[in-house]
Image (cartoon, helix red, strand yellow):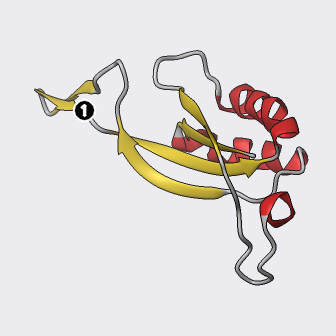
Amino acid sequence: MKEIVAIIRPEKLQKVKNALEDAECNGITVTEVKGRGRQLGITESYRGSNYKVDLLPKTKLEVIVKDENLDKLIEVIVKNAQTGDIGDGKIFISNVEDVVRIRTNERGENAV
């Protein structure tokens, strides 16, 4: 099993969520976060004064998937989160050793 952690633009959340549901991926955790990448934030102007916003609002998605579904779901996220502009985000993939469903005590892929 793998954990997909995707950091995306907040305005892309609904589109990505709907696409994941269409791909039969229903379990998802969503967190509103702030961060920055290579762009190191943005400079904005307000009433003639410039100021730097170095932590931008982002949305963090976490999904646990079976190994055989990994590439499909990464493709779904990229396709639906991509704008082609700086700040589209990143996807991180990690191994998951085990999963336990608290309600039934099921373990492994059956608990996903």
Q: Tell me how many marks there are.
A: 1
Q: Residue furthest bottom?
A: 103
Residue identifier under label 1: 54
Q: Which amino acid, by three-letter code, is at mark 1?
A: Asp
The residue at the point 89 percent across, 50 percent down is 24
Where residue 78 appears, as percent x and y from the top left, is 70, 27
The residue at the point 57 percent across, 42 percent down is 11
Where residue 105 appears, as percent x and y from the top left, is 77, 79
Q: Quadrant of residue 34?
A: top left
Q: Quadrant of residue 35?
A: top left
In the displayed structure, does residue 7 sit left or right of residue 96? left
* Above or below, comparing residue 56 to residue 87 in the picture: below
* Above or below, comparing residue 107 to residue 67 in the picture: below
Foreground of the two, 91 or 77: 91
In the displayed structure, does residue 14 sit left or right of residue 46? right
The residue at the point 82 percent across, 46 percent down is 66
Secondary structure found at label 1 = loop
Where residue 69 appears, as percent x and y from the top left, is 85, 38
Where residue 53 appears, as percent x and y from the top left, is 24, 34
Q: Residues within 10 Å of mark 1 (few under 14, many from 20)?
A: some
Quarter of the image with the C terminus is: bottom right
Q: Residue furthest left?
A: 49
Foreground of the two, 82 or 77: 77
* Above or below, comparing residue 105 to residue 95 in the picture: below
In the displayed structure, does residue 97 sit left or right of residue 109? left
* Above or below, comparing residue 101 to residue 33 in the picture: below
In the displayed structure, does residue 67 sit left or right of residue 100? right
Foreground of the two, 79 or 61: 61
